[in-house]
Amino acid sequence: MPRVILTQISSRAWEHPADRAALNTLRAIPGFDEVVRKVAGFFGERGIRQLFLANAVRVGPRQRPRLNQIYTEVLETLDWPTRPQLYITQTPFVNAGAVGFDDPFIIMNSGTIDTLTEEEQRFILAHELGHIMSGHVTYVTIAIILLNFGVRNLPFLAGMALLPIQLALFEWYRKSELSCDRAGLLGVQDLNTAMGTFMRLAGGKPGNDDVSLEEFMTQAEEYDTGGNAWDTVLKLLNTAFRSHPFNTVRASELLKWHRTGQYDAIVGGNYLRRGDEGTQPLTEDYVDAAGYYGAKTRETFQQFGDAFGRARDAFNNAWKTNK
């Protein structure tokens, strides 16, 4: 079935409220702008690009032409006028990214090509283009640099108390992934392909065995809603320095968005277009974002308090018993 061309679609049409709220919170942290400026100045656009020019394969009409054609179709579906360069790098891990500062480009690991079907690769390419269209790439690049190098290895940041910035940056990065998963779905326009991508990202290729998307979604729901307060604490500790949410979380969030009817509305032509963002009041958008993010934060800290309270009581009781 042919995909609908989303003419002049604005990234605001798919952005997750928690993405916008987390980014606003991040920008409000004292010293954040200085960190961005210094990290970007230290590494520079050309330095990052030269690394991939030297040791990756740039996709084009005569270099991986099938992937190049899929990429062309993604650009057409999301109606993006520029063509960021696309590189394939020899890395066994299944991943991709959009990096850079003024002139961003997309990188796809060879492990992604080996593991995913062509339609699942389409989903990944649309996801990464979503980062570029949403203006995420500067912050994503900073997050990747901090994740791989660490603040202690950057001489100009030595001695700075950057833990709050790191935590806030990774929290936003994870929320931005939820936005761009929506862009991925709009690029591929097939929910089963999107869900199957998350299952392969979590468990790899099935080989000669059978896999069940339904069972994977049951697992996703169990992770999302199951467990007690201590499980919530463990989830937070497990994700604090991750750049991406767990794949079950991503699948669950994208399915929830699809069920709201917003996806169908966009594919049906009812969406915000580029250039019209300023004509719509932002108040409701900010309220939605703050409401979503605030509710999640209050819930998390309440569960934190409950869990640590019970842990304290259990410890005190055990101490009394053993005295």
Image: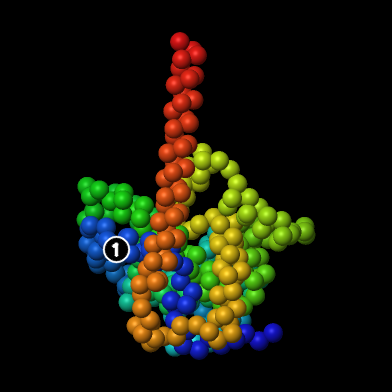
Q: Is 216 displayed left or right of 63 in the figure?
A: right
Q: Nearer the viewer, residue 292 or 102?
A: 292
Q: Who's the residue at 65% across and 75% down the image? A: 190
Q: Farthest residue toward the top?
A: 323
Viewer can see residue 144: no
**Quadrant of residue 64 within the rendered picture:** bottom right
Q: Who's the residue at 23% across and 57% down the image? A: 30
Amino acid at circle 1: Arg
Q: Who's the residue at 43% across and 76% down the image? A: 12
Q: How is the image coloured?
A: rainbow
Q: Is 236 displayed left or right of 227 in the figure?
A: left
Mark 1 — residue?
27
**Quadrant of residue 168 within the rendered picture:** bottom left
Task: Point out residue 194 in the picture as x, y percentages from the top left corner.
Answer: 62, 69
Q: Nearer the viewer, residue 305 or 44?
A: 305
**Count of number-bearing discs:** 1
Q: Who's the residue at 59% across and 62% down the image? A: 251
Q: Quadrant of the N terminus?
A: bottom right
Q: Is 87 displayed left or right of 149 in the figure?
A: right
Task: Point out residue 57 in the picture as x, y percentages from the top left corner.
Answer: 50, 74
Q: Quadrant of the C terminus?
A: top left
Q: Nearer the viewer, residue 306 or 121?
A: 306
Q: Nearer the viewer, residue 115 or 199?
A: 199
Task: Point out residue 154 in the picture as x, y percentages from the top left corner.
Answer: 27, 54
Mark 1 crowd level (few <14, some 14–19, many ≥20, 10 Å Cα): some
Viewer can see residue 300: yes
Secondary element under disc 1, as helix, strand or loop, is: helix
Task: Point out residue 14 in the picture as x, y percentages from the top left corner.
Answer: 49, 74
